[in-house]
Every structure is written in C-alpha cells, then in structure tokens.
Amino acid sequence: MDAQTEKTGKKTSLFARRFIRIFWGTFISLFLLVVLLFTLIALGVFGPMPSFEELENPKSNLASEVLADDHTILGSFYIQNRSGVTHDELSPHLSAALISTEDERFHSHSGIDVFGLGRVILKTVILRQRGAGGGSTISQQLAKNLFPRDTARSSNGLVRVSRLALAKFKEWITAVKLERNYTKDEILTMYLNTVPFGSNSFGIKMAARTFFSTTPDSLRVEEAALLVGLVKGPTRYSPVRHPERSLKRRNVVLGQMLKCERLTQKEYDSLTQLPLNLKYRMQDHNSGLATYYRELLRLQMTANKPKRENYSVREQYQADSLLWETSELYGWCNKNRKPDGTPYNLYRDGLKIYTPINAKLQRYAEEAIAQHLGGHLQPAFFREKKNSLFSYKVDKKMREQVIRHGIVRTERYRSMRAAGASQQQIDSAFHVKVKTTLFSWKGDIDTVITPYDSMVYMKKILRCGFIAMEPNSGRVRAYVGGNNFKYFKYDQVYVARRQIGSTIKPFLYTLAMQEGYSPCMKVPNVPQVFQVGNSTWTPKNSGKTRHDGEMVTLKWGLANSVNNISAWLVKQFTPHAVANLMHKMGIHSFIDPVWSIFLGTSLITNYELTAAYTAFASGGWHIDPLLVDRIEDKNGNIISRFYPEKRVVISPETAYLMVNLLRGVVDHGSGLRMRYIYKLKGPLGGKTGTTQNNADGWFMMIHPNIVLGTWVGAEDPQVFFNSIAYGQGASMALPIEGLFMQKAYADPSSGINENDQWAVPETLRGVSFSCNTTDSVAQEGDGGDEFF
C-alpha cells in the first residue's frame, strides 16, 4: 500500500513538474512572441510607424486665421476648420470634464490603462456587455487622431479583425511614445486641438467659437461639459440637430465630474437644470465679418506668377505682372518658403494674418449698408421696378442683351450646356418653376419660381461697394465688397469698374489749385462749346442754378457740381493733363483723355478712387491701401511685415486748398445731407457722383483720420432708377457714409471724432476761403451732378 502510494505520488509530482514546465514555457513563448510582435510593429515591419521627428512635430491641417486689429478672428482659410491653442488658453473646466469622462486615471498611467483594458476584456469581450465603455486612454485617442488608421475595407472577417488588432497595437506603442515625449498637459492640449466636434469645427478653439461664440479659456462648466460630450459622437449628440440628446449627454459628463469629485452635489444639481444656451454660428467662407475682404486676401496671397497664355486680355496680364513684381502680398504663398523649402499653404499651415481691419468699424459699415439699402433704397427700387426691370430709356435690343447675358452666367445654364442640352431645352427649362432660395435683406426667401424670374429678381437687387482707409497710413479699416458673399461673389470695391461721374471733378480742380487758382476765384457760369471733329458739343447742367450767366467762385462750382465750371476748367488745362494727374495720384485704370473727361465716363474701381482721394486728406501723399500688417507662422514667429507705399503727388498747399473745396461740398453743396440729415459736425469734405441715367451713385468723403468711398448701383448699368430723387449719389451712396459716421462718432474707440482737424500749411495760415458771395446753402436740384 505504501509502495502504491509512493508510486502515485511520483506520478503526480512528475505531472506537476511537466505542467509547470509547459505553462512557463508557453507563457515565456507567448511573452517573447508578444515582445517580438511589438518590436516588429515598432520597427515598421507591419506598416509605417510615426518617426521621432513626427512625434516631435506632429502634422495636422491647421486653418489660417484672418485677425482684426484687436486680434479678434474675422475668418479662416482651411481644409479642416482647426486652429491650435496652448494649455494656458484652456478653461480648467475642460480638463476636468475630459479626464472625468474619457480617462479617469489619465495622470496615473503611461499611455495604456491596464485596469481599463482589463475591464474592457472582461465586460465587453467575455461578458458581451454593450455600453461597458472603452479602454482607450486620451493618449491612445490622440495617437489615433494624429496618425489615423488604415481605412481600407475587407469582406474577410479574419482580415478585418487582424487589421483592427494591429491598429490597436500601433496606437498603444504610439501612445507610450507620446507619453515619453510630452507632458500630460501637452497631451491634453494636443488632444483637444485635434478632435472633431462637428458643425465644421475641428479642435476646441473652433468648437468654442462655433457653439458658444467664445474662446476656450472663457468656457463655463456646462459649456465645457457639452463640448466634451460631443467627442463621443459629434453628429449623434449635435446640440443643433439633436438638442435633447445633447442635453442628456452633457449631463452624463457632469455626472462623471461629480463621480470624480470635480463637482459638488450642489453644483451638479444646479448645472443639470440649465438649458443649452447655445450661441451657435456656423463657421464658413460665406459668413462672418469682412467676407469680401477675406476673399480678396485669399486671391492675393495664393496668386501664381502670371503667364501670358493664361490671359485672354493683355491689359489684365500686364496689371497682374506689375502686381507680382511690386506687391509683397500678391502671390505671397508662392514667393515665400517654409524652413523645409516648400511654399506656404494657406489652407494647411496655420498662418496668422494680422490685418488693419477694425472689427467695430467693419460692423458699422455692414450695418449702415443693410440699414440704407435694406430699409429704404431697395424697397423703393422694387416699387419702381414692379412692372418692368427696365426703364423706357432702354431699347429692346439692349434689354434682350442684358437678359441673355444674365441667363448665360447662371450655374443652371452652364451645367445644362455641359450636359449637352440644346438651346431650346435650356430656354424651356428656364420657364419651369423649381424650388429656389433668393436673397433678401430680411433673410433668405425659400420659394417656387422659374429660373428666368429668379434671374430677373436678382437683377433688381441693388449692389454696394464700401471702403474706409486711414489717409496717413493707408491702413484699410473697413471693406464691404457687396451685399452678401453667399449670393453675390463679385467684389464691387476691388474688381468692379464703373463710371465715376462727378467724383472725377476734384482732380480737375486740383490742377487749378496747382496752377495758383484760389477756391474764391470767380469764373463764368456759362455753357462751354467744344469742337469735336466737324461738329460742336455743349455740355449741360442737370438743371438751372441760381447763378446762371454770372461769375461764380470755384468753391461754389465744385460744391454744386456745376458742369459749366468743369467744362471751363478742362479748356484751361486739357483732358490729357487731367488724365496724367489721376494716374500720378494712383489710378491705374485707363482714362480716356477726351473733352468730356469731367463727366466721369471712364471705368475705375472704388479701390483706386478712394486711394487717390487720400492725397487730399494726407497733405499731398498718395498711399497704397494696406491690407495686411504682418503674417506669423503657427508658432507665432513673424514671417513678413508690410508697410505702406507712400509718395508725394501734390503739394501740402494744394491738398489743403482741395480740403477747403471738398468741405464746401458738405457745408454748402450736394453733400449737405451729411449736415442737415445726419447731423454730423466736424471736419468733413466730400464729393457726390451720378452717372448717365442714374446707373451709378457715388459718394467720396474725407476726414483727417478716415477716407471713405461708396458706390451703389444695379449689376447692369442698363438697370437704374428713373427718378433723380432716388438715383443721384446723394440719395444712393451718401446715406451709407452718413450712417457709418454717426456710428463712428458715437464710439470713442473708433479714433474718428468731430474735433479732429487738418494741419494748415505755414504759407496758408491766416488765409480765409469763406467766399461769402456764393457760399449760400444749396437747394435741392442745384448743380450739375449728372451725366449728359
């Protein structure tokens, strides 16, 4: 019995030793296999792994930001709307909410949470409990965001599982490497900078701006909880599409903060009762402040070096070639190189573009345009155009041409043409009602209308271009290239060339002042006869004045825009002299040097014209508009600074005499509404302009600290007000500047006030230009502010 027991004991002992050997052998083999597997993965045998350089400098698409002079963000250029922040720029509530919800042991692990991983294996894999939570740490999620998984799909289940496992292993390794290279705060910040939050916002900075119109450091507890809640599912928990679901998710995050003792019970109870209180504003290229200005920057900065074969118009090629050579901003992205030698990418490199735009003045300009056009002028235009788009003055052939041109420019026409549709099919389609969204100043109009009627409706919309510049620095302070960038892409400031009407006359008077004339010099207010070929031409005024046939001062002649006086002056100095002076003062567009030059029939941009007027307000200096102050890279290093191009174009004495003449327009002439309607005091000068058939309305205004240029008109010059009462520059354009200046005067921070004064040149001190004999206040209808 003892022998049998001994024999059995030996067998058991042998089995135990064998089991232990097999167990440890298997364990060690598996361990070595795992070590080998992770080593091979780390070495990149199963696919590339992030290098040390990539971990030190992880790449992501960063939006380039356009900033106003107070560093508020005007807009962004991006592929993904993402912009980075530092840890100091994060609200502490964000860190608390994120760690409580996504990674409770964030500060105690080194990239892999063993306890969390064990919980996932037990509950999710073995017990099949859905909703048991994931095991990915914040570091692992960051690794996934920075170095995305292979998204290739396979119908083979084993292949899919192996790819998923391999991706997980790679993320573990990358997470550990990230933990070795960065502090916890840096990892947390990088994660919040890379995660998508939905609504076209990537990273916490854009999310805070999109959903709450604030910055990450200003987020309140409940706001931070809502944004952290979005991380789990930006679409599923969107507060815009699913507010109730988003509210529940926010409260779950708050519950996690309570559990982790980041909140007290009292705070939790109070916060969970709060509504969402969104300040949602979708970020895109069509919305926000200064949309046309941002588009101008985009086109300027990304321009390529002009090639002749890409241009159908030689003059445009020459103009762009000159810009390429003389403008540092034009083609900036292609002219400048990053440290690695590649050109800058406006959509990926996270540039900071600091501009001179003043956010308040920009808002005042946009509000003034909406107030005047939307509240007054557009309704009047609709009433006049109720039965017909065109005036009786427009012949049938021209009407057909405008309509045909409007149809051809529509996206519907182009797409149908590209699809091979015949002209008959296209014409038929344009008279079939479809669902359409139309622009209106009161908001988008969703309606059912034919494409033809839609096109005609849009032709009735009056357009506007407005620019404000500092006369002594050239810094552009406000820029509105149109009514609404979503509907009207065409820039009415920089691109559109329109007839400028009587705003050309100050250049003619500048010639006179240069030649020793005085504002109080008297000249004959009589019709002037010009020999044109074999016939004669006599320009007319828009109506009778109180001084027809009399000797009047030049100051009165400009104040009332009298064509008789302008005609007399052009006879003294020749059209070529006027054109040469305008070019010298910064106007690059072609100016036809004909006797009728003073009627302003040449096509010129508002951008050029306003820049030329700065010479009057700056003491004789022409200053090119300055669009950008400086550009920084994503790390805050200054890459480029920009300075205005300045040159003397007229003497300080001539400039001051012109200031006196232009002030007469506001004090006694066609710009008098600035005083008696808008009650504006202080040093204001200006000039109205109206073109043939009231197609274009202008008002140019000067002040010691600001120069304004405003144009108003329809898209086509053949569409216009029949009545001069509405169609003149004093009615179409001047009110916008009047409203703008009211807002600027009321804001002490604007730098524009009624106590500013122009410096008087030494040689003109003590000289009076009151010209009392004809400086009486103008009456409605006085003057010749109209084309003939």
Image (cartoon, rainbow, N blue to C red):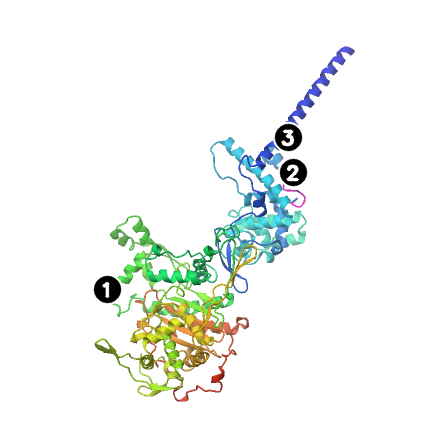
Could you tell me which residue is drawn at 40 percent across and 72 percent down? 584
Q: Which residue is mark 1?
A: 397
Query: What amino acid type should be assigned to the residue bearing mark 2?
Result: Val
Residue 548 can be seen, yes or no: yes
The residue depicted at 52 percent of the width and 40 percent of the height is: 149
Q: Residue reaching furthest right?
A: 2
Q: Secondary structure at mark 2?
A: helix
Element assignment for label 3: helix
Disc 1 or 3, which lies upstream in sequence?
Answer: 3
Q: Secondary structure at mark 1?
A: helix
Badge 2 is on which residue? 114
Q: Are marks 2 and 1 in contact (CB under 8 Å)?
A: no
Closest to the observer, 552 or 675: 552
- The answer to whether 484 appears left or right of 29 in the picture is left
Q: Which x, y percent locates residue 628?
A: 49, 63
> How many angstroms separate mark 2 from mark 3 (CA)?
16 Å
Amino acid marked by disc 1: Lys
- Check contact, mark 1 vs mark 3: CB within 8 A: no
Instruction: Please identify the quarter of the rendering in which residue 433 is found.
Output: bottom left
The answer to whether residue 787 is visible is: no
Magenta residues, start to end: 106-112
Local crowd size for mark 2, using a 10 Å CA cut-off: few (<14), some (14–19), many (≥20): few
Image depth: mark 2 or mark 3 in front: 3
Residue 3 drawn at (x, y percent): 77, 11
Q: Is residue 198 left or right of 262 when viewed as pictured?
A: left
